[in-house]
Amino acid sequence: MTWNKKPLIPLMMVAGIYLLFFGLPYQVQSTPQAPPPSLAQPREGGVTLFLDKTVIQKEEPIQITGKAPPGKPVFLEIASEKLVRTSRFDSKKDEKTGKIPYILYMSYEIPAFYQTLVPANLKEKVEEIKKDKNWSYAQALKDLGAEAAFLMPAKARVERYQASLLNSIIGSRGTLLSPMEDKENKKRTMQLIKARFRSVGKVLSARVEVKEDGAFSAGFVIPAGSADGKYQVTAVVDKETKSAPVIFERKISFFTLYFASAGTTINLFGPFFLALAVTIFGVLMGAGGGFILNPLLISIYPLPHAIVAGTVMPTVLFSQLSGIINYSKIKFISWKLGIIMGLSMLVGGFIGPKLTELITLDQYKFVFGWILLILAALMVWQTLPNVVGKNKKEQAILNEYKKRAQEKKG
């Protein structure tokens, strides 16, 4: 009897496609790193470090254990190997000179995820730092005794630009200044870490339990929305005493994508349906919906405001293009007025992106919030009966809609 192999071909193709997109089952992917036989005293001045997993998915906890010299605090640095661009504009008056520097600091080498775990007995100090609205990351590390644990970001090189209004108008960041010395570069890197993560709780957490014999442990969970790929964990006691980095990998599901410019992962379905709903309402209002998408994306997803502004711009083109075609069919477009305003918007398109780099998230929210309030007030005022009655053009549009509605009924 001969065995017909042709029916197996489609099955093999389906299996191949499944493995290509979804990978092997998680039980096969996850190969936990076996804990050591014992936590014996390490070599003099050394630190041992172990993880209970080398591969994780979603918000799965990781258990970190190890052994350090007795009687000393242990700090754990956890950093993504994926890097993102981060910028900070220095517009604070210098206490020595009394002048505002107007310098833009930028680095392309800031970890997409970064956090330092400090001993659990420092929890009260961490909580005190959280209460300070004007907290300094460098001062926080100093107060916690964790300065030696600032390892991976310290290697990042920071560029600085002398900014000006003229540079912004012509679409430039400004004049590139000479490289900084290592000490100054490290200081600016710490400021960029704060600019990137903003919240104390995102970069500092008191959860390392240290015993008298030097054995330490800490449970940790990579938050949702964090980068995928490899992470490295390093245990640090002081400048001379630290462990070798231990690597683990975070995997994401098929419908979740990593956005390199923002350093975060997002499930595709959320933005898709959000944009669908906003566009329907936005085109109805005579806009692309960007003014609605902006605050929603910032509030819902962990995205930098500059990335949100830049992302919304091209996506709005899709709704605007379809809106232009349909509005032109019913002859509701004044091309002369549109071209005049378009030329002005062309100039504004050069200025806006650079100004976005020069303001903080709080400043962005403040300005955007007031603009939305003013627009809302104008829209409400224009809907009042006496205003609508005086506006002949508005009345003509309403009459046109009524006429077409009657023709369809007829």
Image (tube, rainbow, N blue to C red):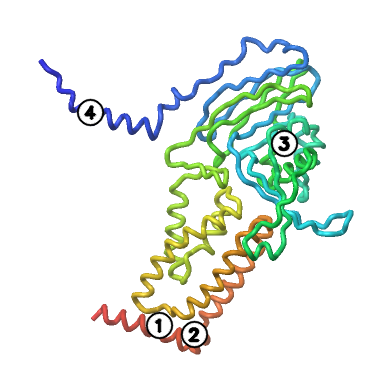
* Location of mark 1 (residue): 398
Comparing marks 2 and 3, which lies closer to the viewer? 3
| Residue sitting at x 15%, y 19% | 3
For the point 26% across and 79% down, which residue is it?
A: 409
Say which residue appears at 62% left-offset and 61% top-offset: 171
Which residue extends farthest right? Answer: 96
**Residue 324, visible in the rendered structure:** yes
Amino acid at dot 3? Ala
Q: Are marks 2 and 3 in contact (CB under 8 Å)?
A: no
280 relative position to 384: left or right: left
Determine whether the residue tagged by mark 1 lies in a helix, strand or loop.
Answer: helix
Q: As shown in the figure, which amino acid type bears the numbered disc 4?
A: Ile
Instruction: Measure the alpha-carbon separation of dots 1 and 4.
Output: 62 Å
Quadrant of the image containing the C terminus: bottom left
Which of 102 and 251 lies nearest the eye of the viewer? 102
Instruction: Name the residue tied to disc 2.
Output: 388
Disc 3 and disc 4: Cα gap in Å? 54 Å
Picture disc at residue 9: 4
Q: Secondary structure at mark 3?
A: helix
Where 197 sits versus 246, above or below? below
Quadrant where the N terminus is found in the figure:
top left
Q: Is residue 197 visible?
A: no
Q: Earlier in the sequence, mark 3 or mark 1?
A: 3
